[in-house]
Structure formats: C-alpha cells, structure tokens
Amino acid sequence: MISLDSSTTATALLVGVDFGAPHFDEELNELAQLSLTAGLSPVHRMTCHRKAPDAAMFVGSGKADEIKELALLHGASEVLFDQSLSPAQQRNLERHLGLPVNDRTMLILQIFAQRARSHEGKLQVELARLQYLSTRLVRRWSHLERQRGGIGNRGGPGETQIELDRRMIGESIKRTKERLIKVKRQRNTQRKQRQRNQVFNVSLVGYTNAGKSTLFNALVKARAYAADQLFATLDTTTRQLYLPHDGGGGSQLSVSDTVGFIRDLPHGLVDAFEATLQEATTADLLLHVVDASHPGYPEQIEQVMSVLNDIGAQDVPQWLIFNKIDALPPENQPQLMQDLYVYDGQAMPRVFLSARNGLNLDTLRQRLLQQAQSHADSLLTLQPVHVT
C-alpha cells in the first residue's frame, strides 16, 4: 500500500511499458506528478518496449530482474507501474521483487482518497476502492486459504476466509451504492430547482491541472482550492455568476467546477463518480479547459472527449478554452484570441485566455452573456400562449 505519511516519505521506482500506444509517456512525467501528489518521492524512471504484456509478470522475468536490481541500487521502497496490472501480475511481481508493487489505478485511487472532502466524494472514492480491492483478495494474505466455518464461527460450513472477505466487501459495496443513490437524489433535486428557475448551467471540464479551478475562481470570485498539481479539485463546486447587460439588468448563470480527467482514468472511478460527473451531462454548456502550454494537449483533449462520451455528455454544446497562454513562448502566441477548433470533423468555438492573470477573460464573459441571453430567448419562445 502506498505510504502517505509525510514524516517518512516513501521512495518509488517508476516503470512504464511501451506497447506502441500513441500516447505513451516516454519520460513518465505524468506518473512522476501523480506519485509526488500522493506523497511519494520518485528515485528512478525506467521504460521498456514490448509487443504485448507478459501474462505472469507484465514485463517478463528478465526485465523483472532488471527492475529488482535498479530498485536495490536506488533504494526504492516500492515500484509503480504506469499501466494497470492484473491481480496475478501484481502478486507475482511482489513475490519476485520482494517489494510492494502498485499500478496507476491504485495510485489514482489513493490520491482521490486523500483529497476527497465532501460526504459524496468520500462515498464515491470508497466505492471505487472497494471495487478495486474485490478483485485482489488473493494479493498478499496467505491466511485467505484457510477454512472458516463450523460451530461457533462466522460463515457457512467450509467457507474459506477469501469467500468470507469477498462476501463482506460485496456487502460494503452494496451499502455504499445505496448511500450514493440517496446523495444522487439530493443532487437531482437541486438540479431540478435550477432548471425550474431557468438558470443557464455551465460546467467546467478538462484534463487535470488544466486550470479549471483557477478559471472558476476568476469567473465567480470564489475561493475554490486551486494549485499547480494533479487532482487539486475532487468535489464539484457550484456558484452563481451574474453578468450585467450594457443596457441595464443582467443574466444569472450557474457555474460548476468538476473533477479533472486523466489518461486511463480507472473505469471504477468513472462509474463511482457518476453523480458528480452528471453535472456535465445535464449542463447547457461545457467549457472544456485545455492547458495550451502542454505539448501533449491534443492527446489530453482526446482523453477528455473519451470520458465525456463514456458518461453520456458527448452531445452537450462545448467550447474549448485554451488556458495558460501566458506560459506560451512569443512565437506560439495565438494570432486570434477566438476562433474555431475542428475536432472529429466538428468545428467548436475556441477562446484563448489566461485565467491566472485575467488575459482575455472579458471576451469569455461577453460570449457567456450572449449565450445566456440566447438561451433565455429560446425558453420564452417555448412558453405556452394562454388565450383569454
């Protein structure tokens, strides 16, 4: 298990295996950021190439021997893989290396467990963790092979410890799901109230650390936590934004800051965070925030689009917000501060800005005002006409 005790920082050897995927991180930069976020100190990075994963140890016995030598040389207290490992692969690697082995999925789960603050967020993390652990009961504990049961013991006759543990985890998953259903009903009630008030709903989505929370704070003058780290925000925050009209009056918008997405986001987390991510599926407009200064932003856009498709938000109108242009070199500065970005044959509005210093933020506010007015006008045309 990953250590999150700041007084004794654990050290980790990072391992990535290139199977020919277009988004392979050769430098393991994202895995290093994730490990630092979880309180780990990376001491060495290692990458290798394979045509397919080894069924027993993911990397093969020869490469496993190399990992063992490197871990010993650099004093690593555990090994982190940039891909997901099967329970058998994880167990075999731990036996071979003599060290704890964790994968990208477990690392993300640990970070979510550390960062969740709201009751809903904690429930969602707990559900994802239980679902992950339910497949790994045979990971380290030899006592799971012993029989339980008989007179005076819990469990049925001949019930093994692993069967008992699996049943207990199954019951915990069921209870957690039931509690999440209640939370989901409460959120739906709040959402229906906003719909009855005909408020224009905007949700911020995007890759983690793209600057969503910074933009959220800049728009609504909130104090949501924002930092230059992965998964700074886990719990959805909703605030009201009032945009004044030039001729008097104004429009009221509801703006929600959602959890950031990431490459290979564990499916258990996508399922568990359905209630939170539902803010995106029911929004009138998605502001897809992109880190324009990141060299791999096209792949990050692709990953966010994939998750939006998974949660059923692919048809919600979407604008691309290219953030952090203050971090771009002069030769890469945009010629136009707003244009169209073509993705999968579809042209989407794009706005360049810097949420940190407010550059071009007024353009976004003006466009949001126009969109909110257009939304209000369309609702008026749909109102029934009463003839007296």
Image (cartoon, rainbow, N blue to C red):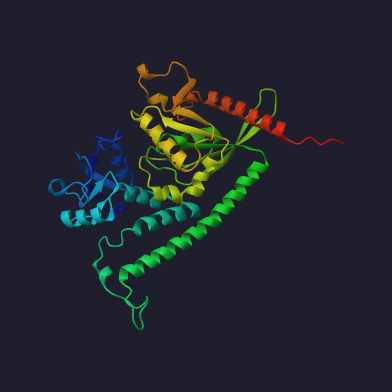
Image location of residue 334, percent across then percent down = 42, 18
Q: Residue furthest right?
A: 388
Residue in view at x 36 percent, y 17 percent: 330
Q: Is residue 81 above or below residue 303?
A: below
Q: Nearer the viewer, residue 124 or 355?
A: 124
Q: Is residue 7 left or right of residue 242?
A: left
Q: Is residue 356 above or below residue 179?
A: above
Q: Is residue 136 left or right of residue 216?
A: left
Residue in view at x 61 percent, y 48 percent: 190
Q: Nearer the viewer, residue 309 or 99?
A: 309
Q: Is residue 163 above or below residue 55?
A: below
Image location of residue 276, percent across then percent down = 50, 47
Image location of residue 193, percent across then percent down = 65, 46
Give the quadrant of the C terminus: top right
Image location of residue 378, percent across then percent down = 67, 30
Q: Is residue 140 above or below residue 386?
A: below
Give the quadrant of the N terminus: bottom left
Q: Is residue 297 left or right of residue 92?
A: right
Residue in view at x 66 percent, y 23 percent: 246
